[in-house]
Image (spheres, rainbow, N blue to C red):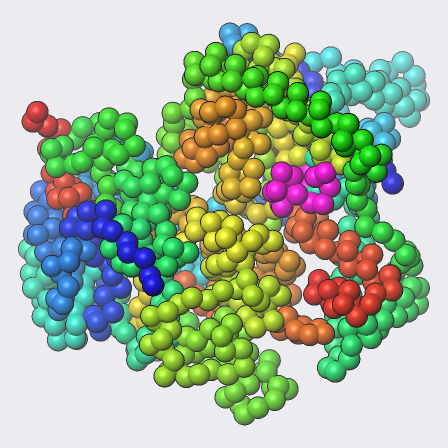
């Protein structure tokens, strides 16, 4: 089973063009948000239509401008981040992006440094376009960066799966609502549902759910090979734990105490910044989060951060595979990327519900893990021994989150009103529908509706 | 055996309505007022008010009338609180309940849109609230044990209102209905959090850190909530206490909190007509089947009895007193919502010991961070007839408490395992025709389709509900900052 892929492309923006690019992207955003009600112009309308064509494989994408800023005295140039989660190979996604979104893409990247210009070497315009497409592909490829950690809320489930399974759940629920099952056993109801789904046809007399087949939940487990190895691993594990403890003590004594944490409260944050962030929140039942963090100076901080993100990434492949990232049950995708020669980290996520709910979950469900990772970045509330205090300093933590959050100009979600819990539940409904269940399992199955 | 709850709060400085529902006050009137253009008059009026304010102090037990006051940010600005100091208030309060973002969160759209409110929002979206006649400056909350007592008190207060030229923006009368029932017919105000340090005994699972409700004390995270400190000295700084969080500044917020006020019209006929139509095929007498469905949606029987204890029938009013005294409902024993649907209003607004897939202990720990002290009073307006509820609640962090409950737990249709179920009582939007209410059952639950909205917001506001000291201080903010050492 293949898993959802991710690509991130970061390119420098022409410094004099940052504001123009922002305005251009904002026009696109206005149209990706139906609720916003502004009339799209012709170009953006075209772009929106083009976005829709990607819809069968693309879960999310965003364009985010990183403004010029100073990190430890060095100036970092303005940059444009494109990041996406999808179901095909990155090369094929990029090619399709360029082909389907050719004009909107050129319009965006014209504001960026070293974007290849369209040649007019041939009199045949399609040849020119082809040439340009290849150059753009190389350009995007060259500027693609790897994620340090990548989390997937529903591993292996494609956009098509998600939409099909939502349709299936809807259909089954309507079947339940329109039939009287009083006095029937759960197994009988289960059977009735399966028969209904298998024999359902649309107006064109074709089966509604031709893709129904026996399936298993797409999950990954600890490789079984690890189990006999566990006793052998105890020794090294103890050594590792002691080493990590010493490491944390060292960081506490010689770094953390001297670092400058945030002292602001939420009310003291910049009004315009907050207004920008909130203007585009909560149109759907999902939201996005983009954050740029400067890594604290010194190699120890960088090593700690790299190690912890490596562990996060590793656990995201084998352990955080059932819709929870460190206990947080609302994240669809999240990734951490080192940028600017490891001087900064770009964090992005797509989540259910409001910012307040998301941040409460952060503190309540994984405050320690979070503090361990983020305390290696500047301004994070003071931690003790890497994992204590930090995020639990609620007011300053919330202010830190908003302070370091940046505006995302364009954001797209393929299913903005489905929660990750819904998606995983729908997956279970499908898998269990096609399986033969005993009475107890059938009862549990029916509770999913 | 209910554990003691030692008094650590400065009760004499806290306005009484935060700690007491004034249940014996059968009549009440909330006056939304605009200050006169002359600040001296406004200070003069405040000076007549603060000596009369009812504190939560024990000496106030058994009194026959009460007076409390709350302020909008525009009221504080009118009084002359400087921009620097205003900025130390949380953004929710400062911006107001009517901003487009909050409108999305709270679901105040269509008929409930701020543009259509009678009070609390500017006349048009782009109007500066400072220029508005409708947002109000101060909310004077007057209570009387009887109608006569209230009217007598109002007449007294009115002399000062006239003398100092305050203008009435809205007059909001409230009553207590028999058995504390709101207009849909349900007993209201049953479960309330117990504030740690208030002296009221309470079960530990329901005793919440002081700082969740009163500024200047630690909250459930063990830290001090954001509080409006005075960073640019003005007025009589001697009056104010120091910021407990240690900023070195004086704290205007200590012993105060924030009041959320929503005037909700209840469409009682529409509600029961809907219930009647949707339960028509159920068994039992008309009253039984209607009450059963309505109770499933509300999460309690009309008498207030819990669906957990009484899954089949309403034990009636005889049960009410027991309910008031002993509100120990556990949802952990009903994880599938077979007795009390997890989509019901009361259960989702406070999931207690069954929150997501957490253990009961952990659930309580988590849900304690999203509690409010509710204060509701029903109202009736004649000509044209309108029934409704003055919903009020107190919280220290509007975003994490009131707004979180309203959005994440009530309006959000994907709450928990649900897919398209908003809160059937307060969370349905007018255009939500495909929204449903799920009643779990065995082998299969039922779904009530085509939910309707039964409440309309008629006015709303976020208010600062200050300590007595802070009210006294506010009458001095026109003076230059002074502080004798």
> Can residue B241 be seen from the camera position used here?
yes
Chief SS of the magenta region: loop
- Name the residue located 50 percent from the left edge and 83 percent from the top edge: B313
Rendering quarter of residue B249: top left
Q: Is residue A110 left or right of residue B238?
A: right
Magenta range:
A319-333
Q: Nearer the viewer, residue A219 or A296?
A: A219
Residue B213: % across, % down: 32, 49
- Name the residue located 41 percent from the left edge and 84 percent from the top edge: B316
Q: Is residue A273 left or right of residue B482?
A: right
Q: Is residue B424 left or right of residue A34?
A: left
Vertically, is B280 above or below B238? below
- Name the residue located 16 percent from the left edge and 75 percent from the top edge: B146
Residue A381 in magenta stretch: no
The quarter of the rendered structure image containing the C terminus of chain A is: bottom right
Residue A80: % across, % down: 65, 22
Vertically, is B168 above or below B23? above
Residue A325 in magenta stretch: yes
Residue B165: % across, % down: 11, 53
- Name the residue located 47 percent from the left edge and 49 percent from the top edge: B365
Vertically, is A1 above or below B302? above
Vertically, is A440 above or below A334? below
> Can residue B136 be seen from the camera position used here?
no
Residue A368: % across, % down: 54, 33
Q: Nearer the viewer, residue A434 or B127?
A: A434
User: What count of labels does the image hold?
Assistant: 0
Rendering quarter of residue A336: top right
């Amino acid at each position: 089973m293949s898993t959802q892929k991710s690509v991130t492309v970061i390119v420098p923006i022409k410094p004099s063009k940052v504001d123009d690019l922002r305005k251009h992207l904002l026009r696109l955003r206005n149209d990706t948000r139906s609720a916003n009600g502004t009339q799209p112009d012709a170009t953006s309308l075209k772009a929106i239509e083009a976005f829709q064509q990607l819809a069968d494989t693309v879960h999310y994408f965003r364009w985010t401008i990183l403004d010029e800023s100073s990190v430890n005295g060095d100036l970092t140039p303005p940059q444009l981040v494109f990041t996406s989660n999808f179901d095909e190979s990155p090369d094929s996604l990029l090619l399709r992006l360029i082909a389907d979104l050719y004009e909107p893409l050129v319009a965006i990247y014209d504001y960026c440094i070293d974007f290849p210009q369209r040649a007019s070497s041939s009199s045949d315009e399609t040849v020119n376009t082809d040439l340009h497409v290849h150059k753009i592909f190389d350009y995007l490829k060259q500027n693609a960066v790897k994620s340090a950690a990548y989390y997937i809320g529903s591993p292996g489930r494609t956009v098509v799966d998600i939409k099909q399974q939502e349709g299936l759940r809807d259909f089954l629920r309507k079947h339940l609502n329109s039939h009287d099952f009083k006095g029937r056993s759960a197994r009988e109801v289960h059977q009735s549902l399966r028969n209904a789904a298998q024999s359902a046809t649309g107006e064109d007399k074709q089966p509604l759910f031709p893709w129904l087949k026996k399936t298993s939940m797409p999950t990954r487990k600890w490789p079984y090979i690890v189990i006999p190895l566990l006793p052998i691993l105890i020794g090294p594990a103890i050594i590792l734990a002691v080493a990590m403890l010493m490491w944390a003590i060292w960081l506490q004594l010689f770094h953390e105490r001297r670092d400058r944490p945030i002292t602001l409260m939420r009310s003291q944050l910049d009004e315009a910044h907050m207004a920008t962030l909130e203007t585009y929140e909560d149109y759907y039942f999902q939201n996005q989060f983009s954050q740029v963090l400067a890594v604290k100076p010194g190699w120890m901080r960088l090593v700690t951060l790299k190690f912890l993100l490596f562990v996060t990434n590793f656990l995201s492949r084998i352990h955080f595979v059932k819709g929870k990232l460190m206990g947080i049950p609302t994240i669809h995708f999240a990734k951490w990327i080192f940028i600017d020669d490891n001087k900064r980290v770009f964090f992005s996520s797509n989540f259910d519900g409001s910012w307040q709910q998301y941040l409460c979950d952060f503190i309540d469900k994984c405050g320690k893990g979070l503090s361990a990772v983020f305390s290696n970045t500047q301004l994070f509330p003071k931690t003790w021994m890497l994992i204590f205090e930090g995020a639990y300093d609620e007011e300053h933590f919330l202010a830190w989150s908003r302070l370091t959050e940046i505006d995302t100009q364009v954001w797209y979600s393929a299913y903005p009103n489905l929660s990750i819990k819904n998606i995983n539940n729908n997956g279970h409904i499908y898998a269990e529908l096609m399986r033969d269940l005993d009475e107890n399992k059938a009862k549990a199955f029916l509770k999913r509706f | 055996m209910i554990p003691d709850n030692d008094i650590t709060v400065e009760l004499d400085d806290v306005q009484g309505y935060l700690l007491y529902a004034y249940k014996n006050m059968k009549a009440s009137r909330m006056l939304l007022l605009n200050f006169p253009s002359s600040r001296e008059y406004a200070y003069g009026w405040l000076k007549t008010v603060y000596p009369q304010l009812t504190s939560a102090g024990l000496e106030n037990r058994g009194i026959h009338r009460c007076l409390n006051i709350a302020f909008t940010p525009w009221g504080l600005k009118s009084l002359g609180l400087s921009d620097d100091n205003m900025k130390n208030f949380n953004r929710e309060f400062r911006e107001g309940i009517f901003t487009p973002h909050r409108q999305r969160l709270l679901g105040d759209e269509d008929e409930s849109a701020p543009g259509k409110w009678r009070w609390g929002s500017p006349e048009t979206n782009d109007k500066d609230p400072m220029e508005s006649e409708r947002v109000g400056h101060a909310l004077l909350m007057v209570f009387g044990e009887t109608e006569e007592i209230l009217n007598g008190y109002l007449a007294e207060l009115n002399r000062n209102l006239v003398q100092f030229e305050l203008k009435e923006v809205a007059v909001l009368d409230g009553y207590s209905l028999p058995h504390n029932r709101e207009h849909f017919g349900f007993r209201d105000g049953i479960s309330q959090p117990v504030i740690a340090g208030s002296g009221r005994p309470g079960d530990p699972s329901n005793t919440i850190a002081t700082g969740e409700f009163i500024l200047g004390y630690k909250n459930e995270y063990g830290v001090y909530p954001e509080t409006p400190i005075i960073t640019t000295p003005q007025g009589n700084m001697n009056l104010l206490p120091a910021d407990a969080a240690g900023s070195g500044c004086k704290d205007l917020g200590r012993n105060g909190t924030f009041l959320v006020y929503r005037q909700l019209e209840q469409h009682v006929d529409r509600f029961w007509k809907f219930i009647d139509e949707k339960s028509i095929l159920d068994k039992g007498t008309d009253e039984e089947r209607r009450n059963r469905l309505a109770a499933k949606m509300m999460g309690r029987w009309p008498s207030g009895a819990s669906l957990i204890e009484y899954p089949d029938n309403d034990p009636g009013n005889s049960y009410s007193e027991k309910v008031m005294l002993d509100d120990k409902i556990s949802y952990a024993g009903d994880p599938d919502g077979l007795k009390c649907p997890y989509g019901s209003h009361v259960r989702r607004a406070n999931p207690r010991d069954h929150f997501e897939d957490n253990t009961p202990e952990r659930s309580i720990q988590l849900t304690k961070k999203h509690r409010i002290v509710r204060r509701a009073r029903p109202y009736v307006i004649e000509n044209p007839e309108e029934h409704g509820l003055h919903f009020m609640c107190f919280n220290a962090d509007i975003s994490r408490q009131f707004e979180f409950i309203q959005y994440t737990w009530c309006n959000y249709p994907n709450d928990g395992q649900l897919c398209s179920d908003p809160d059937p009582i307060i969370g349905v939007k007018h255009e939500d025709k495909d929204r449903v209410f799920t009643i779990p059952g065995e082998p299969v639950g039922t779904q009530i389709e085509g939910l309707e909205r039964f409440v309309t917001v008629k006015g709303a506001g976020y208010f600062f509900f200050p300590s007595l000291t802070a009210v006294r201080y506010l009458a001095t903010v026109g003076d230059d900052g002074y502080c004798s050492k």
